[in-house]
Amino acid sequence: MEDGYTRGILILACSIFTWIFLHRWSQRTNKGPKTWPLVGAAIEQLMNYDRMHDWLVNYLSKSSTVVVPMPFTTYTYIADPANVEHVLKTNFANYPKVSIISMYQAIQLTDFPFLMVTCIIRIWRCCLEMASLIQMVRTGGNKERRQALSLHLRTYETLAQWFSEITLRFIDPLWRVKKFLRVGSEAVLDQSIKMIDDFTYSVIRRRKAEIEEAQEVLNNDKMKHDILSRFIELEKDPENNINDKSLRDVVLNFVIAGRDTTATTLSWAIYMIMVHDHVAEKLYAELKAFEQDRAEEENVTLKHCETEDLESFDLRTKQFAQLMSYDSLGKLYYLHAVITETLRLYPAVPQDPKGILNDDILPDGTKVKAGGMVTYVPYSMGRMEYNWGPDANEFKPERWIKDGLFQNASPFKFTAFQAGPRICLGKDSAYLQMKMALAILCRFFKFELVEGHVVKYRMMTILSMANGLKITVSTRS
Ligand code: HEM
C-alpha cells in the first residue's frame, strides 16, 4: 500500500518535472521572456517590477515585438512604428483604450476630453509662480506658503502612490485576492483612493462655497471662471446629469492628463539640461538672443538686473515673462527640440496598453488574440537603434533640428503623445506650458544635481522620478 503511494507521488513528480522541462525547452529560441507553466512570465515581471521599462528595452531591442504570456491574459509589447500605426490608426476600432481605472473598476472617471479647456492665464501665472517659488526657496519664504506647498506635495505624493498600486495590478495575478482580503498593495490603494477623494471633494466644496459667496454679494469679480466652476454651474441643470462624483472625475482628469504629464516632463528636462552642459549653454544663448530680439521688437529697454539683488532680478524675470507671446515662443526651436528629445527618452506615459476586441495579425506577422492586450511602449521606442540610429540612447536635441528649423518625426515613431484618432488633445497646450516654464527657468537659473542624489523613475503609469530631483540653483545674469 505504502509502495503504491510512493510510486504515485514519484510518477506525479516526474510528470510535473517533465511538463516544466518540456515547457521551458519549447521556448529555447524565444526572444521574449521565458515563461513557466500556469504563471507565464509573471514571476520574471514581478522580479523586475521596479525597472520594468528597462526590462522591456532589453527585450524589445532584440525583437521589435515581444509576447509576454501572463496567468489570465497575454501582453504583446510593440516598438515597430508600422505595428504601432496599425494599432493606433489603421485598425483603431479593434484596439480600444484600456483605462486602467475603469478596467479594474477602481473608480470610474468620465471622459478625458473634458480636459480640452485650458486657461492660458493660469499657465502664465504658474510660470511666474515657479520663478517666485525658486525665490521662496532662496529667501526661505513665509510659513503659510510653505504649509500650502507641503499640503499639495502630500496630496500629489498620495496620487503617485495610487498610480503605483494601480500599475502593479497589471502584473500581479493575486491582486483580486488582496483586494478581497484588504491586504498589501490593495490596502494601500484603498487608503490612497480615500485620501485623494477627501482632497478632491474638499476642493469641490470650497469652490462651491466660493461661488455661493460671490453670487450672494453679486460680485462678478469674485466669480471664478475655471473649468471646475463651469462644471459646478452645469450641475444646476438636472438634464446635465452631473453630480459630485462627476465633478471629482473632472478634477482628477485634469490632474492626471494635464498636470502630472507636464510636471514630470519638466523634471526630466531640467535633469537632462543640467547633465548636458553644452545643451544648457546653447539653450541659454537662444533665450538671451530671444530676450534681446523681443525687447527690440516691442521697443522696450531691458531692465538692469544684478543677480545678487533680488528685487532687480525679480523685475527682469517678470519683464522676460511679459515678452513671451504665443507666436514668439514658436520660434524657440532649440527649446522645442530639448523638450521633444526629453520626451523621446523619458516619455511621460512610458507604456500605453490597448485591449483587443477581435483576433488580428499585426503588420510584422504577429498574431494577437481577442481578450489580450497590445501595448505600444514609448519609453522603449525612443531608445531603439532600429528607430533612431546608433546614437538612440544619447540625449541630442540637435537630431530634431534641420537647416535651423525644428523637424518633426512620425507620430508613430515618436509616440509620447500617442498618435491617430486619440492623439493627446493637450499636446500644443503642453508644449506651450513647458516652453514658458523652461524659458524662464533656463534663462535666469543654472541647475546642478546634488552630489550623490540618485535619479531614477518610479514604476507607475506616469514616468515620475522615484526620489525627486535634488538640485542646487544659482542665478544667471
Ligand atoms: C508632456 C505632456 C503630455 C503628454 C506626454 C501627454 C500624453 C498623452 C497620451 C500618451 C495620451 C493618450 C492616453 C491614452 O489614450 O491612452 C494623452 C491623452 C490626452 N491628453 Fe495628454 N499629454 C500631455 C499633456 C496634456 C495636457 C497639458 C492636456 C490638457 C490640458 C492633455 C489632455 C489630454 C486629453 C484630453 C487626452 C485624451 C484624448 C482622448 O482620449 O481622446 N494632455 N495624452
Image (cartoon, rainbow, N blue to C red):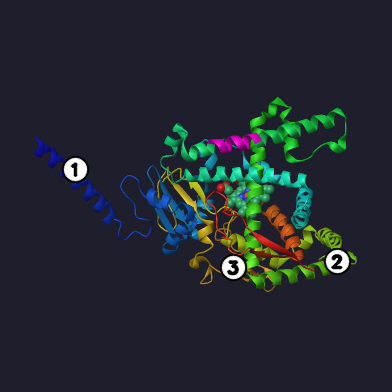
CA distance separating discs 2 and 1: 82 Å
Task: Compare residues 34 and 305 and report the one nearer the observer.
Answer: 305
Q: Is residue 385 left or right of residue 29?
A: right
Tag 3: residue type? Phe
Question: Which portion, as a residue range, is magenta?
Answer: 190-198
**Residue farthest to the top?**
238
104 left or right, relative to 318: left
Residue 395, which numbered label?
3
From this view, report whether residue 314 is shown above or below residue 405. Answer: above
Mark on residue 305? 2
Kindly report which numbered mark, 3 or 1, lies closer to the viewer in this rendering.
1
Q: Of the residues shown, which amino acid type is indicated by label 1?
A: Leu
Position of 188 relative to 141 (above/below): above
Residue 433: x percent and y percent? 72, 54
The CB of the residue at mark 3 lies under 8 Å from ligand 1: no
Label 2: few (<14), some or many (≥20) within 10 Å?
A: some
Quarter of the image for the C terminus: give it: bottom right
Return the mark for residue 12.
1
Q: Main secondary structure of the magenta part?
A: helix
